[in-house]
Image: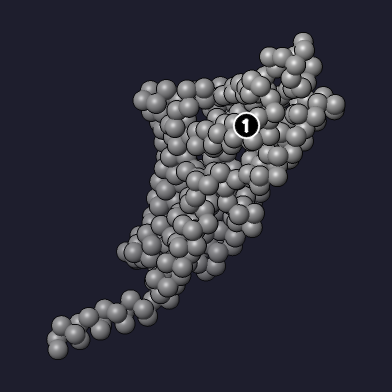
Amino acid sequence: MKLLGFIKKELIQTLRDPHLGVMILLAPVLQILLFGFALTNDVVNIRLGACFAPNDVVAADIYNAAVASKRFCRADITGYSPEGAVRAGVVDAVMVAPAKGLTRGGANKNAELQLLIDASSVVRAVSIDGFMQAIVQKVCAPAESPPLAIVAKILYNPQLETSTFTVPGVMATILLMLVLILTCTSIAKEKESGTFETIISAPIKRQHIILGKTVPFALVGLFNSLLILIAGRIFFNLPFRGCWWIFATEGLLFVVCSVLLGILLSTFVKNQQQSMLCCFFVMFILMMLSGAFFALDNMPAWLRWVAYANPMSHHTLLVRNILLKGGGLDYVVPHLLCILGANIVLGIAAFRRFKITLN
């Protein structure tokens, strides 16, 4: 009876805490939904561009068959060269027919269809090649003899090394986890130990308190971002084809975003236990919807819109593009603006909540 009474007491104490109750009841539901929808390697929504002459019937049949398969969707590459479209992230692949067309016989007997594939994601690149091979065989054989050949050109990751996809995702995850937990638990620790009131009563301005609690962790985050990049280059031979100042600017914006999110979360918790649970709950959602480990294009359309509101997804996409493709401004600027917008929203919310807490 004593043991049962003690167990009852612990259950009541846990469920009485509204923050812990929400985590216990809400977390499993969200996790199963994310695992079901986001964690999938089914390759769909492949953006396929095409470059062929208007009178090339065979190339048109192949392209239409690819779109009809529901694996591919049409992508307009007007204004781009085939490789330029892949580099800018407009398409996942481009099929390029020879100038004389794919119609077999005569002078064009040995015509080949070139397929340019973005190999930033190895699983996606291999699947694209396999899907196109099957579609060409279905459309052209046995009418074409010998069968039409596809020459696949793997761009930005010709060795198809998985690390070029996973390491940038790990970089983003470690950076978010480190900065978020340090910021949130630091403020929660002050509340739990009772020193938060001492800081408030000190003869310093409120904005100094906020900056004093955030700047150190932002510096730690920037240092770790550089450390992770160096480790990736040393141990995984990760390429770096972009500009250092673009990479640094993007990293700074994301670190600031993580710090602001940590401040915002800290205003809803009262102790370190709550802060840790809250951080892991939020981090799990952000990581699953970031494209760090599973391509965003594989998700359902409604979930992709949610993912694009996640600043971590823009950070992950930017890091991969800067490292592998050089980070063209036409690709970098929109994602930077999205992270900047998230900073503004989180900054306003965090500072307002923190001032209320100080009062």
> Based on the displayed image, in which of its 4 quarters is residue 254 positioned?
top right
Q: Which amino acid does label 1 sit on?
A: Gln
Residue 61 x %, y % = 75, 34
Please state if 85 lies on the left or on the right of 247 as rendered.
right
Q: For the residue carrying disc 1, how many other residues have a C-alpha within 10 Å: few (<14), some (14-19), or many (20+)?
A: some
User: Which one is in front, 31 or 195?
Assistant: 31
Residue 129 x %, y % = 57, 31
User: Which one is in front, 79 or 342?
Assistant: 79
Q: Is mark 1 on a helix, strand or loop?
A: helix
Residue at 19% across / 85% down in the picture?
4
Residue 124 in view, yes or no = yes
Residue 17 x %, y % = 38, 76
Residue at 40% across / 46% down in the picture?
178
Query: Which residue appears farthest toward the bottom when viewing the image?
Result: 1
- For label 1, the residue is 137
Image color mode: one colour
> Based on the displayed image, in which of its 4 quarters is residue 63 positioned?
top right
Q: Quadrant of the N terminus?
A: bottom left
Residue 349 x %, y % = 60, 60
User: Which one is in front, 114 or 86?
Assistant: 114
Please state if 135 lies on the left or on the right of 202 as rendered.
right
* Image vertical order of residue 107 relative to residue 320, above or below: above
